[in-house]
Image (tube, rainbow, N blue to C red):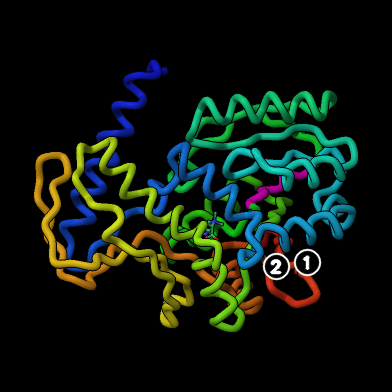
Amino acid sequence: MLDRTSAEETQRHAFQADVIEGLSKARKTLPSRWLYDDRGSEIFEEITAVEDYYPTRTETAILREHAGDMASFCGERATVIEYGAGASVKTEILLGALRSPELYVPVDIAGDFLKASARRIGETFPDLAVRPVVADFTGDFELPDDLPEDGRRTGFFPGSTIGNLDRHETVSFLERMREHVGGDGRAVIGADLKKDIPTLLRAYDDSEGVTAAFDLNILTRINRELDGDVPVERFVHEARWNEESSAVEMHLRSLDDRTVTIAGRSFSFAAGETIHTESSRKYSVDGFGELAAACGWQVSEVWTDEARRFAEFGLVART
Ligand code: AVJ
């Protein structure tokens, strides 16, 4: 185990490498995971409460409404593997509805965060065994090999985080999850659905400016952690719909021709040029079903809200 300072150093190096690589491209881009430093995670929490940002409250309502059905879907003595640590109320809704659950396995790359949320879940559900696994769930990783034989395994991936993965990552993620849950396995996955474009764009460029602050924070992080001199106030946040990838994209647009220095290197912007910071893919129910089918799954249940804004898919492993 790395101690705290060397873990932070490793992170900083990875961040620096990604920033240099992303800003050197003809179309500048930054991996969206770097949006989530402490401040970024805090602003994201604020986004979830914003009126224009419908996904979180819609999914939470779907989970509350259908928790009983989802629990039956998982079965008795279930093992639930959650991809991304369960810091959220969503985890508690599912776990709270299960009948005599066997084990909860939260998987997250952030060790400290994972430990804290595992402890909290353990306190809320004293009879439930909790086995946290520190791993990057977008990459290959092994589950502990002594998971209970009793009951089924369900992979739980709420939050429409699946929408942030590109095509290739989505396929490998669904295939890996299929391997993890085994023969009689299940998955419960939240995905945001395609809808009218103005609604989508408002969700990612809200009238309160919270999403703009979230996006721009990555520049503040670059300045702080990578000794950058980016004038944050000369960049503006923008949300765009990309029809080809069926995704809302977040971009940061430079208002001026300018050269900035980051980690001792220069990067030039033309006025109007953007950095692509995130894609959030939107699915149709059929499209998601086809993708799942190509990855060893079959859609068994689609739990959705009345306006069909968001869907929680119940998948069954195909044998
Ligand atoms: C945390 C990935 C679900 O894509 O909707 C929210 C992130 N970005 N507003 C999403 C986000 C801008 C969010 N997820």
- In-image side of 214 versus 21 (left or right): right
Q: Position of residue 120 (x, y in %)?
A: 71, 27
Residue bearing the label numbered 1: 303
Q: Position of residue 68 (x, y in %)?
A: 89, 53
Q: Earlier in the sequence, mark 2 or mark 1?
A: 1
Which residue is drawn at the image coordinates 41% and 61% (left, top)?
278
**Marks 2 and 1, how far apart in space?**
6 Å
Query: Which of the pair 57/314 is nearer the observer?
Result: 57
Q: Are marks 2 and 1 in contact (CB under 8 Å)?
A: yes
Which residue is drawn at the image coordinates 58% and 30% (left, top)?
114
- In-image side of 23 versus 290 (left or right): left
Q: Quadrant of the N terminus?
A: top left
10 Å crowding of disc 2: few (<14), some (14-19), many (20+): many
Which label belongs to residue 28?
none
| Vertical placement of residue 230 versus 51, above or below | above
- In-image side of 253 versus 317 (left or right): left
Q: Amino acid at mark 1?
A: Trp
Main secondary structure of the magenta stretch: strand
Residue 271 part of the magenta-drawn span: no
Region rendered in magenta: 152-157
Q: How many marks?
A: 2
Which label belongs to residue 311?
2
